[in-house]
Image (spheres, rainbow, N blue to C red):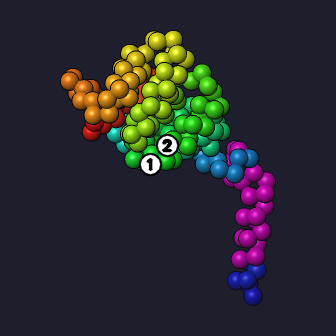
Amino acid sequence: MLHKRALSILALITLAACSSGGFGQSNDPFFAPGVAGESDIDGLLVGHRLMAAGEYELALKAYTRAAAQQGLNVDTLSALGSANLRLGRLGQAERLLRRATDDDPNFPAAWNNLGVILMEKGNYAEAAEVFRRAFATDNGNSDQIKENLRISLALVADPFYDDPQNEDVKLVRRGSGDYVILTAL
């Protein structure tokens, strides 16, 4: 009987501690003393670094965390689309990047990356139009977008076009750094 009474008292103390804010200093249910919270880490920045390191699955997880923190905005949609593209998930990547371009029609990186997907799928005419849109929204400032447009226009004119310089179609993102998609054209 004494054993049951001790367990009951211990359970009541635990419940009281949980309902009064716990043993720490925060009312946040995910608070852990000495551990940085998820909100302290920029998931987009972490994801961009992981993409640059070639860790696409981990980048996708970081971008997913960023989307949970920030919502599905043009930056998180574009980042999720780019990571899915690198993982070969063209359908998912295309849906995400189309949504990003719908949300912000003036975001050149999302247009460019959508064009890369269309190139990978062999939709050269649509890719050329998408690269034109990326080039226009960027005011012609990106050499990568200009080169992607050049390659797509050459493929529209001649689907068997073989680039003599063997250049690749490139992914771009907002901020610094670039991603390269290797194509077997």
Q: Are marks 2 and 1 in contact (CB under 8 Å)?
A: yes
Across and down, in percent, residue 9 comes to: 76, 72
Hey, which quadrant is residue 155 in on the image? Answer: top left
Q: Which quadrant, please, contains the C terminus? A: top left
**Residue 19 drawn in magenta:** yes
Across and down, in percent, residue 18 comes to: 74, 58
**Number of numbered tags placed on the structure image:** 2
Which residue is outermost to the left? 164
Residue sitting at x 59%, y 31% = 101
Q: Is residue 184 left or right of residue 130?
A: left
What kind of residue is marked 2? Answer: Ala
Residue sitting at x 27%, y 34% = 160
Q: Is residue 50 visible?
A: no
Q: Is residue 6 left or right of residue 125?
A: right
**Secondary element type, mark 1:** loop
Residue sitting at x 72%, y 70% = 10
| Picture disc at residue 145 | none
Residue holding disc 2: 93
Residue sitting at x 48%, y 21% = 132
Residue closer to the observer: 3 or 43: 43
SS assignment for the magenta stretch, majority: helix
**Residue 5 drawn in magenta:** no
Question: Disc 2 and disc 1: Cα gap in Å?
Answer: 6 Å
Across and down, in percent, residue 120 comes to: 38, 39
Q: Is residue 143 above or below residue 129?
A: above
Which residue is outermost to the bottom? 1
Which span is picked out in magenta? Answer: 7-26
| Picture disc at residue 89 | 1
Residue closer to the observer: 88 or 9: 88
Q: Is residue 18 above or below residue 60?
A: below
What kind of residue is marked 1? Answer: Arg
